[in-house]
Image (cartoon, grey):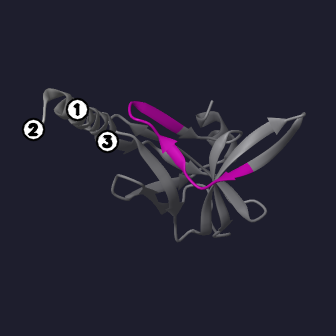
């Protein structure tokens, strides 16, 4: 015959599992704010965008793609010992209730071998791939690099 002492440990495990799964839940609600890119220079360009997660669940940017470049890479400019270097990231976390800004001089999206005919005023589409949300395709406007840098200030 089983006593209360046998049931209590199992009940505690069930309660903990339910509590942990409830905390892990939540739904991300992503909004991608105005995106801009600089005209290509020396085979690359930067893309600025802010991704806002107003939901109660975390998400993660896994990557982005466009027909206007060979690739889009996630980079971060890191300054150490008075030297700036770029570190490539495979993904970027977008926690619930936060926003992540991709701007020159910090976390940014690099267009690798962009279409060399892109000029100020042109537009192109970029599709963002997320871990938990559906892909999102947005229109990006090409602007002067100084305007791009100032929009991140």
Q: Tell me the CA gap for discs 1 and 2.
A: 24 Å
Looking at marks 3 and 1 on the same chain, the residue that comes earlier in the sequence is marked by 1
Look at mark 1 in the image and give the residue it sits on: 15
Question: Is 89 contained in the magenta span?
Answer: yes
Q: Quadrant of the C terminus?
A: top right
Of the numbered discs in the image, which one, if any, rests on residue 34?
none
In terms of image quadrants, where is residue 117?
Answer: bottom right
Residue 2, image x, y percentages: 12, 36
Residue at coordinates 49% horizontally, 63% vertically from top-left?
A: 124
Residue 24 vertical position relative to residue 45 in the rendered view, above or below:
above
Q: Which residue is mark 2?
A: 1
Q: Position of residue 103 (x, y in %)?
A: 62, 41
First along the sequence among labels 3 and 2:
2
Nearer the camera: disc 3 or disc 2: 2
> Magenta region, mostly helix, strand or loop?
strand
- Camera-nearest residue between 19 and 75: 19
- Can see residue 15? yes
Q: Which residues are magenta?
A: 87-100
Determine whether 60 is above or below 40 in the image.
above
Rendered location of residue 87, percent (x, y): 73, 49
Name the N-terminal-most of marks 1 and 2.
2
CA separation in Å, label 3 and label 1: 28 Å
Extreme left residue here? 1
Q: In the rendered view of the protein, which quadrant contains the N terminus?
A: top left
User: Please, what secondary structure does the residue beneath circle 3 have?
Assistant: loop
The residue pinned by badge 3 equals 29
Q: Nearer the viewer, mark 1 or mark 2?
A: 2
| Residue 106 picture location, percent across and down | 68, 39
Which of these two is toward me, 17 or 127?
Answer: 17
* Residue at 13% in and 31% down: 3
């Amino acid at each position: 015959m089983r006593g209360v002492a046998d049931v209590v440990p199992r009940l505690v495990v069930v309660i903990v599992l339910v509590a942990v799964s409830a905390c892990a839940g939540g739904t991300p609600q992503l909004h991608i704010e105005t995106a801009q890119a600089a005209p290509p220079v020396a085979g690359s360009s930067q893309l600025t965008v802010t991704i806002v997660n107003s939901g109660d669940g975390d998400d993660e940017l896994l990557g982005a793609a466009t027909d206007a470049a060979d690739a889009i890479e996630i980079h971060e400019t890191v300054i150490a010992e008075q030297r700036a270097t770029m570190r490539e990231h495979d993904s970027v976390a977008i926690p619930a209730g936060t926003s992540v800004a991709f701007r020159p001089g910090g976390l940014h999206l690099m267009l690798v071998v962009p279409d060399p005919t892109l000029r100020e005023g042109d537009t192109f589409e970029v599709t963002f791939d997320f871990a938990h949300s559906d892909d999102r395709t947005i229109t990006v406007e090409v602007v002067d690099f100084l305007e791009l840098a100032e929009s991140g200030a």
